[in-house]
């Protein structure tokens, strides 16, 4: 078991700092951790229909045997259900079940459950505590850490939400054994991203471990999960609200979010991120921001995990450009990207920001070149 502390020195509350606990079999520690760090009259377990079938009964027994009262609030699985209507339905059901300000949320599952469960916790009764119980690679190493919560709207992904830090994150690597191969690969796209933005040696490790990770070898996945958690935690600790360096974690995501929204979420998030990293690395080299060979190395890493690397033919370039115009990184109407200078190093713009303004003509050319 490893404990990664996420200190948040700039946060408004000293309680904002929390631990990410990762290892095999760590679910057994959940009842005691809840009693110590997130006591509540009622634990509202927010999870999707797939994860509820896999882990709902097990979690209910674990908490019930320890004397905790819990209720499950299940929503239909799929990114397309991460919308305001689902959030409202969950809130209504929780209030009807008697969840007051002395309740807490347990967000169980992948990134969708984490985002929705966290947003319910951030807004119900103007904010109640919650914990993250991620069961996918992507949720463990990325979405469960950092306090970003929210929903998608027709204009784009994650445009409505709030920062709300969990009391703790409990990542049991054993749950990854239930994931299909494409989910493992999609989660490892975020590990590739962490290597590209922060640690070239780690990028190499992620690449070398592809075969073992895709075979669901937990001894291979465990160290990758732990290292990515440390990278993400360190970045978040230095910039909780994404005013500065945390923006580097958006590498690949400007294109990815546009592809997801305009494809009707036909791709897994990590698959869209893989495409986005290749396109944005292409853009970085074209602009002279990245050293020669950066795009090739990103492409090699993506291909090792059998991830897609080109824009789907069914998605029009102009539709993607329209989606990017409402991206969260747009400033004064200009689309900005987090771009690599090299593997393990991110670029600064002339104004010192961690994002680079890019002309629509250059974006269009990079999208067309990536089909």
Image (tube, grey):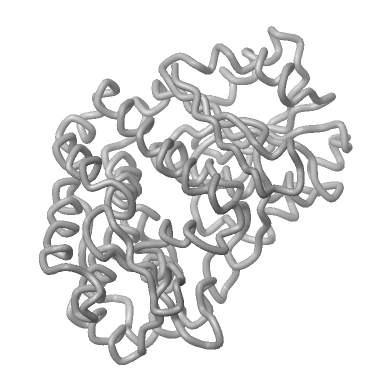
Q: Is residue 87 left or right of residue 41?
A: left
Q: Position of residue 68 (x, y in %)?
A: 75, 16
| The C terminus - image quarter | bottom left
Q: Is residue 84 visible?
A: yes
Q: Position of residue 295 (x, y in %)?
A: 17, 65
Residue at 85% in and 36% down: 99
| Towards the viewer: 162 or 352 | 352
Q: Position of residue 336 (x, y in %)?
A: 43, 77
Picture quarter containing residue 128? top right
Q: Position of residue 360 (x, y in %)?
A: 36, 89
Reply above or below: 228 against 348. above
Picture quarter containing residue 264? bottom left
| The N terminus - image quarter | top left
Reply above or below: 3 against 7. above
Q: Is residue 318 left or right of residue 118?
A: left
| Towards the viewer: 289 or 87 | 289
Residue at 33% in and 67% down: 347
Q: Is residue 65 left or right of residue 188?
A: right
């Amino acid at each position: 078991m490893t404990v990664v502390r996420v200190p948040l020195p700039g946060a408004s509350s000293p309680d904002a700092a929390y631990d990410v606990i990762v290892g095999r079999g760590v679910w057994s520690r959940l009842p005691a951790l809840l009693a110590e760090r997130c006591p509540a009259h009622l634990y509202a377990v927010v999870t999707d229909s797939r994860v509820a079938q896999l882990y709902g009964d097990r979690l209910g027994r674990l908490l019930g045997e320890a004397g905790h009262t819990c209720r499950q609030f299940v929503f239909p699985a799929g990114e397309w259900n991460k919308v305001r209507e689902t959030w409202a339905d969950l809130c209504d059901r929780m209030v009807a079940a008697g969840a007051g300000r002395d309740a807490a949320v347990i967000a169980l599952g992948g990134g969708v459950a984490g985002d929705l469960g966290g947003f319910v916790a951030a807004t119900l009764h103007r904010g109640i505590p919650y914990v993250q119980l991620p069961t996918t690679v992507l949720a463990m190493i990325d979405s469960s850490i950092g306090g970003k919560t929210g929903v998608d709207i027709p204009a784009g992904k994650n445009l409505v939400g709030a920062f709300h830090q969990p009391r703790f994150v409990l990542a049991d690597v054993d749950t990854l054994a239930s994931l299909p191969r494409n989910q493992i690969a999609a989660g490892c796209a975020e590990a590739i991203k962490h290597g590209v933005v922060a640690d070239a040696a780690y990028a190499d490790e992620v690449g070398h471990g592809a075969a073992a990770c895709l075979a669901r070898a937990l001894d291979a996945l465990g160290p990758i999960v732990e290292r990515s958690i440390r990278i993400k935690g360190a970045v978040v600790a230095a910039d909780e609200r994404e005013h500065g360096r945390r923006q580097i974690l958006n590498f690949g995501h400007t294109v990815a979010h546009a592809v997801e929204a305009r494809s009707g979420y036909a791709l897994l998030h990590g698959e869209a991120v893989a495409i986005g990293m290749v396109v944005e690395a292409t853009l970085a080299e074209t602009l002279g921001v990245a050293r020669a060979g950066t795009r090739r190395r990103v492409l090699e890493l993506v291909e090792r995990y059998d991830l897609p690397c080109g824009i789907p033919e069914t998605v029009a370039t102009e539709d993607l450009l329209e989606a990017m115009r409402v991206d969260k990184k747009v400033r004064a109407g200009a689309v900005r990207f987090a771009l690599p200078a090299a593997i393990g190093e991110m670029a600064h713009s002339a104004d010192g920001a961690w994002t680079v303004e890019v002309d629509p003509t250059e974006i269009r050319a990079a999208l067309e070149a990536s089909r």
